[in-house]
């Protein structure tokens, strides 16, 4: 097996084949890029929607009225 | 009886006489005035810092640290190493994926900062330095792609050279010159990115995280 | 107000602070990103398609190699007709109205395609009396004669390439022996050029031409401009690129080889090449770069652009981001 093949075979999933594309009108994007852009949007929404830990400490600070 | 001899006044050890024109003193005093230790490294944040959107700035910095770390390991063994060994290929993969994560985190970070209008309250320079960092990271990545010494590098360099040449930049920034591109990629552009990120973070520490919009405000 | 601080009514925060460990946060972030990078590496690795070589090109596409070499000698190749920074031609010189930066910056990487890609490499081949004689005859001839010879040799090859590309029957003036990679051009009036081209093809197939083109002027070299431009003048790189979705019309500048993610952050740059007038313009590159330059400047100046800097107020996504803060404020009042 060539070094290149060994290195790629070391991956669990072999992405070393021509890409599938998402085609819409004049737009042609690779599936991998669409996945990355989609994940950015999902992560952005999730980051805003999901509660952030430490609410108890923040409430205590508000009640204590302490400034830095 | 004569008066007891007076001892000369003791000079406190921490304040020897320093000329007022000392550059060192000026720099130190300006630095400490702008960023006293408790502002440089505060152990608290305003209570409105309460969203996961805030972690994408530090995620961008963390990605940059991994990029530079993996890049240093690749640089230790030279540009051909990753083609020749599995370990080299492993670190090249870490480098590539951390670049993807860096841009991912930066984009989510800038989306969040836009929707918070994080330039308010005199924080315009924070936005400006952040935007310039993103724009400088793009050619840093490009010089990396053309330094790979594989088919991808051959194609990208021979195609992108037309864009560089069209605006005259190709006359002094030659994408097909591996030596030049490798130098830009491992030294010049990372220095620029790190310098910009440092200024950006210091400005955030100086100004503090932007407060929320006031709900009762008219449009500000 | 400090420099570059846009005016607004944002008051400094005088409210409460809660404990927040920034150093711990950074350490956790570095750990998480490292883990993610390692996970992606283990699952997906990274691409490393081997580079094409001139030797491969001359073996796999001998007619394409011969045609390109003839065009380099004839000074009708893409590089020969490019213009600055390689030479004083104008085939690929772009401008935008009165802006001619490509011409203004001039020839900084001179390439004489006939000399650099054909004559000088052939001069390094020893012990070949036929080639020596052909080179002597070629170099002694006046420029017009050289042009006539190289044109007579190149014309059938160009016709052959065009016929192959259009999937028509190729002319019989060119025959290709795919087993040996030999290209024979039946033409008269080509003088010593057929002998020179046959030797160049042998040199290329032996692997000697790459090193020759890289280290043409000194021992240590890191500049691959000459061999890369030579290969880009031919069809091998483009053929491989099309298979990997890297061509311009395939939005290739966003893509990576294989099925790996590429540079999705270049989406807006790629988009302009797909729309008119840039799509079919000979000045597409300068047009797109100028558009992106203006947009990049606007991106930097968002805080100062009226309207754009108000959108976050008008579309209140901030109410979701700071909902805990607003809830607490309502409780207090």
Image (cartoon, coloured by chain):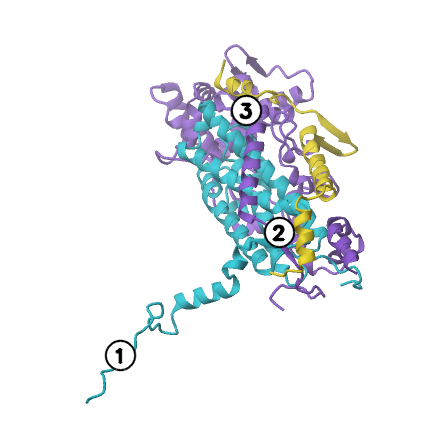
Residue at mark 3: chain: C
Q: Residue at horizontal 30%, vertical 74%?
A: B10
Residue at image mark 3: C49
Is the residue at mark 2 from the same chain as the one at mark 3?
Answer: no
Distance from Cα at disc 2 to Cα at disc 3? 33 Å
Mark 2 nearby-residue class (10 Å; few <14, some 14–19, many ≥20): many
Outermost residue, front direction? B1
Check disc 1 and report its element: helix, strand or loop: loop
Q: Residue at x 44, y 65 (%)?
A: B27
- Residue in the foreground of this view, choosing between C189 and C125: C125
Going by the picture, which residue comes out furthest to the bottom? B1
Residue C128 at what x, y percent from top left? 36, 19
Vertical relation: B90 (above or below) C111: above
The answer to whether A24 is drawn above or below residue C206 in the figure is below
Q: Which residue is mark 1?
A: B8
What crowding class fits label 3: few (fewer than 14 Cα within 10 Å), some (14-19), or many (20 or more)?
A: some
Q: Colour of chain C?
A: purple
Crowding around mark 1 (Cα neighbors within 10 Å: few <14, some 14 to 19, many 20+) is few
């Amino acid at each position: 097996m060539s070094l290149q093949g060994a290195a790629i075979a070391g991956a669990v999933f072999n992405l070393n084949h021509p890409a599938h594309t998402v085609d819409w009108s004049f737009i042609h994007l690779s599936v991998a890029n669409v996945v990355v852009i989609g994940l950015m949007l999902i992560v952005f929404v999730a980051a805003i929607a999901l509660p952030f830990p430490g609410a108890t400490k923040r409430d205590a600070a508000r009640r204590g009225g302490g400034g830095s | 009886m004569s008066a007891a001899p007076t001892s000369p006044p003791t000079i406190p050890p921490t304040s020897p006489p320093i000329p007022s024109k000392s550059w060192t003193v000026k720099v130190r005093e300006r630095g400490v005035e702008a960023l006293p230790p408790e502002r440089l490294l505060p152990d608290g944040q305003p209570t409105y810092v309460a969203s996961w959107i805030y972690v994408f700035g530090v995620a961008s910095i963390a990605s940059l640290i991994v990029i530079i770390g993996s890049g240093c390991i690749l640089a230790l063994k030279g540009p051909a190493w990753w083609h020749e060994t599995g370990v080299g290929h492993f670190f090249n993969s870490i480098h590539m994926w951390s670049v993807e994560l860096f841009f991912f985190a930066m984009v989510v970070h800038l989306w969040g900062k836009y929707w918070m209008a994080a330039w308010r309250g005199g924080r315009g320079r924070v936005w400006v330095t952040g935007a310039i960092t993103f724009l400088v990271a793009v050619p840093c990545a490009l010089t990396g792609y053309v330094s790979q010494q594989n088919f991808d590098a051959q194609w990208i360099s021979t195609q992108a050279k037309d864009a560089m040449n069209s605006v005259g930049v190709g006359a002094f920034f030659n994408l097909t010159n591996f030596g030049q591109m490798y130098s830009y990629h491992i030294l010049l552009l990372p220095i620029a990115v790190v310098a910009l990120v440092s200024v950006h973070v210091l400005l955030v520490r100086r100004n503090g995280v932007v407060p929320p919009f006031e709900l009762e405000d008219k449009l500000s | 107000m400090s420099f570059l601080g846009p005016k607004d009514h944002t008051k400094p925060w005088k409210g409460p602070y809660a404990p927040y460990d920034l150093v711990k946060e950074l350490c956790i972030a570095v750990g998480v990103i490292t883990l993610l990078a390692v996970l992606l590496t283990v699952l997906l690795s990274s691409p490393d398609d081997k580079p094409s070589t001139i030797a491969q090109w001359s073996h796999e596409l001998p007619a394409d190699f011969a045609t390109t070499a003839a065009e380099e000698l004839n000074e009708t190749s893409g590089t020969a007709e490019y213009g600055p920074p390689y030479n004083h031609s104008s085939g690929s010189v772009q401008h935008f109205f009165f802006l001619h930066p490509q011409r203004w910056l001039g020839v900084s990487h001179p390439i004489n395609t006939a000399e650099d890609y054909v004559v000088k490499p052939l001069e390094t081949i020893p012990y070949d009396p036929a080639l020596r004689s052909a080179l002597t005859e070629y170099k002694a001839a006046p420029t017009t004669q050289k042009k006539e010879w190289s044109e007579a040799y190149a014309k059938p090859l160009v016709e052959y390439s065009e016929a192959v590309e259009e999937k028509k029957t190729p002319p019989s003036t060119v025959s290709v022996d795919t087993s040996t990679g030999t290209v024979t051009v039946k033409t008269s009036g080509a003088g010593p050029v057929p002998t020179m081209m046959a030797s160049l093809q042998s040199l290329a197939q032996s692997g000697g031409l790459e090193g020759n083109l890289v280290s043409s002027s000194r021992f240590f070299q890191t500049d691959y401009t000459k061999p890369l431009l030579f290969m880009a003048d031919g069809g091998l790189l483009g053929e491989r690129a099309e298979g990997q979705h890297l061509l311009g019309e395939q939005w290739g500048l966003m893509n990576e080889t294989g099925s790996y993610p590429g540079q999705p952050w270049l989406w807006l740059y790629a988009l302009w090449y797909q729309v008119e007038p840039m799509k079919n313009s000979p000045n597409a590159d300068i047009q797109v770069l100028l558009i992106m330059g203006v947009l990049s400047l606007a991106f930097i100046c968002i805080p100062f652009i009226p309207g754009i800097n108000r959108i976050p107020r008008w579309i209140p996504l901030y109410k979701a981001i700071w909902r805990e803060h607003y809830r607490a404020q309502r409780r207090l009042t």
